[in-house]
Amino acid sequence: MSLSPHSHRVAANAYLIYEDRFLLLKRSKKPFIWGPPGGKLQIDEDPTRGLQREVLEETALQIRVFQPVTTWFGYFNDVPLLSCDYLCTSQKNTVSLSHEHNDYRWLTIKDLTRDKNIYFTSDPGFKLSDYKLAWKTYLMNKSL
């Protein structure tokens, strides 16, 4: 095991919205959760650029990053992980999935609320309350 000056890994995820719908991806490996696109940043990588890289790799979408919505710290695959989750938008909705995911959906906040047992049953996993906060942030930015 090599020593690193870094205490944990850092990830960034995109609450990605296109025409008032969130993009959710289904992981193809454990844990088989639904969540926003994103992933671990490279050592010392700028979070915004890293998020744009991750989303492009996972979906082939270019995104606009607005602001952080939530943060999370815990263990993912037995590794300490800090996740910064951002409000983002896309000008397109045509998704080309990477091997990391096997399904995707564009869903309204009403869809997520109505079908919460489908998308929010796993731990670790993203929470409906996080999407609601992202939606509120989106509506505030949309009026600017």
Image: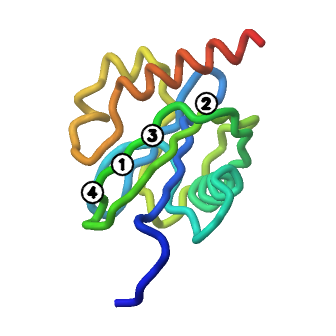
Q: Amino acid at mark 3?
A: Thr
How many neighbours does mark 2 have within 10 angstroms: few (below 14), some (14-19), or many (20 or more)? many
How many neighbours does mark 4 have within 10 angstroms: few (below 14), some (14-19), or many (20 or more)? some
Residue 120: % across, % down: 28, 34
Q: Amino acid at mark 2?
A: Ile
Q: CA distance from mark 1 to mark 4?
A: 17 Å
Write the residue at 61% across / 48% down. Answer: 95
> Which is nearer the eye, 78 or 109?
78
Residue 142: % across, % down: 71, 15
Is the residue under label 3 in contact with that under label 4 (CB below 8 Å)? Answer: no
Q: Earlier in the sequence, mark 2 or mark 3?
A: 2
**Which residue position holds label 1?**
73
Residue 78 lies, with reference to residue 18, above or below; the image says: below
> Which is nearer the eye, 142 or 42?
42
Q: Amino acid at mark 4?
A: Pro
Write the residue at 34% across / 90% down. Answer: 1
**Which residue position holds label 4?**
31
Write the residue at 31% across / 66% down. Answer: 79
